[in-house]
Image (cartoon, rainbow, N blue to C red):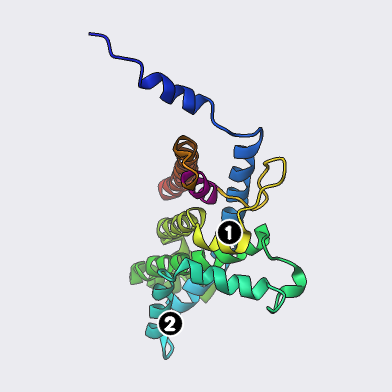
Amino acid sequence: MSVPLDPVVPLLAGLLDLPFREGYVRSIVFVSLYVSVLAVTLSTLVSIPVAVAIGFTEFPGKRLLKSVINTGMGFPSVVVGLLVLFAVSNRGPLGALNLVFTKEAMVMSQFVLATPPITAISLAAVAGVDDGVRDAARALGGTRLDVALVVLKEARYGIATAVLAGFGRAISEVGSVLIVGGNITGSDGISKTRTLTTAIQLEARQGQYETAMVLGAVLVALVLTVNAVVIRLGDQGVRR
């Protein structure tokens, strides 16, 4: 029994004849990766030392600080976008830098969004390291820095998970990047501040569902690739 091809042919034709200008997809992928990777890298450089400092120090208000960090994981992204937009606007403290509707403003927004999950999960990973590891490092004459490095080595897989969580939140963000970035493309169709997520939203609102689905597939492929690379590196570290 043959399968009717009438419904299939238009769908395939639509997928093969998407309204992409040359370089359009490449440009929005570049903007997405540039903004998210830079924001997560900066966030990681801040979050891990903060997590180690909190994990190794006892001080009044430590439990409250951890609660604030955990609460930040669910902070509304549109509010973050508004705060960053105010900061870079003409009336804001960073107005002289002319960062409104730029990739740099988007990096700032995603930095704020990625920092709480990276800090919170890294802190949990550091706190989850067995006390015997710290005691052994101290017994061998290790300094405070040596003990911290040993703990970080033991917690590296959890920290990798934290970075992945931050990257996932950053690259999947829509609201804040729309507010601070403006979803802008040039007259040639090349992205200036348009990301994969904002492009998907735009195409879906215009009824271009096939285009949105293809862009969604590209986004999922990027996330899976980054996750696979980080997990692979973590597994190699564990085997060593």
Residue 160 against residue 60 in the figure, above or below: above
Residue pictured at 64% horizontal, 64% vertical = 105
Residue bearing mark 1: 41
- Decide: few, some or many residues near mark 1? Use Cα within 10 Å; few <14, some 14-19, many ≥20: some
As drawn, which residue projects farthest toward the bottom? 60
Q: What residue type is labelled 2?
A: Leu
Seen from the viewer's position, the closer of residues 184 and 140 is 184
Seen from the viewer's position, the closer of residues 53 and 215 is 215
- Decide: few, some or many residues near mark 2? Use Cα within 10 Å; few <14, some 14-19, many ≥20: few
- Say left or right for 193 vs 204: right
Residue pictured at 57% horizontal, 33% vertical = 19
Residue 143 visible in the current orientation: no
The image shows residue 57 at horizontal and vertical percentages of 45, 82
Residue bearing mark 2: 65
Residue 228 against residue 109 in the figure, above or below: above
Q: What stretch is highlighted in magenta?
A: 196-204
Real-space Cα separation, disc 2 to disc 1, in angstroms: 23 Å
Under circle 2, the secondary element is: helix
Q: Earlier in the sequence, mark 2 or mark 1?
A: 1
